[in-house]
Image (cartoon, grey):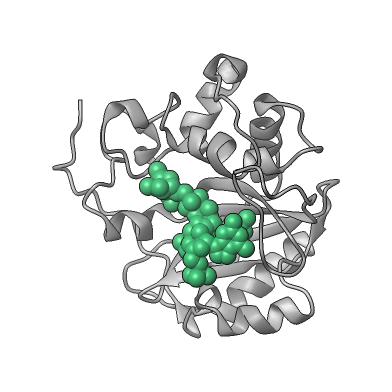
Amino acid sequence: DGVNLREFDYFKLALQWPGTYCRRTRHCCSTNACCRRSNSPGEFTIHGLWPDYNDGTWPACCSRSHFEEKEISSLVDTLQKYWPSLSCGSTSTCYGGKGSFWAHEVQEKHGTCSSPVFRDEHEYFLATINLYSKYNVTRVLYDAGYVPSNTEKYPLGGVITAIQNAFHLTPQVSCSNGAVQELYMCFYKDFTPRDCAVGVQSVLMKLASKSSCPKYISLPEFVSKGQELIQ
Ligand code: 5GP
Ligand code: 5GP
Ligand code: 5GP
């Protein structure tokens, strides 16, 4: 803790695909009452906004701070919708509060390293929601015919090109068993779009597991498991 004092270079908006995430874990909670998002799980949801360095590494846990849910009370409805935790072990970690997905992202990990861009939690969460809304990657994919399906496979190149054309940035995509798991879009500190991997980093990325999607990928439909009801 507290050792990563060098200022970060850019932001990475990390999105997750619920259909893939929830296929992998028995603890997917998005079918239960606390995760309302489950009614339309055919969209990317937010994982986090991550400060990164140009060399492919990133800082984490930069300062000890306290997650104060009351700071973001005006955003909670929106966060519940677009930034649900898909792996709730109990209702207390479903939304907000200590130990939640939100607290982990902002306080324990990435949010504390995004200074001096954000002065507080409210700014961090608001900026993340704004980026997610402005760069609606799910809509771009739908418009290009890349819709959730358990039988279709889509060319990774086509998916990337559709996003490049819409937003003038090159995203990164990560997969699990050929299914899109996460999608990353990158931004300068002033929130203008940029490519995620540049120069040496893009060569390294090609070798790393992060970009190891097959040539044809799937966007699995969300399958409700039904038995994960946690009250
Ligand atoms: P994984 O090993 O599952 O890809 O990543 C584990 C965790 O490391 C992520 O949840 C995230 O917190 C962090 N992480 C992975 N890749 C990146 C990255 O490119 N940038 C940042 N800032 N964090 C990352
Ligand atoms: P890997 O060896 O798979 O790249 O990374 C293992 C774990 O170490 C990742 O899940 C990630 O959480 C962490 N990690 C890898 N690179 C970095 C980095 O540059 N900064 C930080 N903070 N964590 C990293
Ligand atoms: P990161 O991957 O950013 O280091 O952090 C992910 C942490 O948040 C993991 O410890 C994971 O158990 C927890 N978590 C809670 N809900 C979710 C979710 O919906 N998606 C992911 N990727 N992690 C979640």
Q: Residue at x 50, y 34 (%)?
A: 102
Report whether residue 43 is seen. Answer: no
Q: Quadrant of residue 120?
A: top right
Q: Is residue 165 above or below residue 40?
A: below
As drawn, 53 above or below 46: below
On the image, the x and y values in percent for residue 224 come to 23, 48
Where is residue 196 drawn, in percent x and y?
71, 66
Q: Residue at x 53, y 31 (%)?
A: 79
Q: Is residue 194 visible?
A: yes
Left or right side of 47 for 94: left
- From this view, report whether residue 65 is shown above or below residue 179: above
Q: Is residue 11 left or right of residue 108?
A: right
Quarter that holds the C terminus: top left
Q: Where is residue 10 drawn, in percent x and y?
A: 77, 55
As drawn, 212 above or below 30: below
Name the foreground residue: 27 vs 143.
27
Between residue 184 and residue 81, name the one nearer to us.
Answer: 184
Residue that extends furthest to the left in the rendered view of this protein = 227
Quarter the N terminus occupies: top right
In the rendered image, residue 154, in percent from the top left (x then y), is placed at 48, 77
| Pick the front one: 150 or 35 | 35
Find residue 133 and report its image quarter: top right
Residue located at (56% from left, 14% from top): 70
Q: Nearer the viewer, residue 91 or 155?
A: 91
In this rendering, the count of numbered labels is: 0
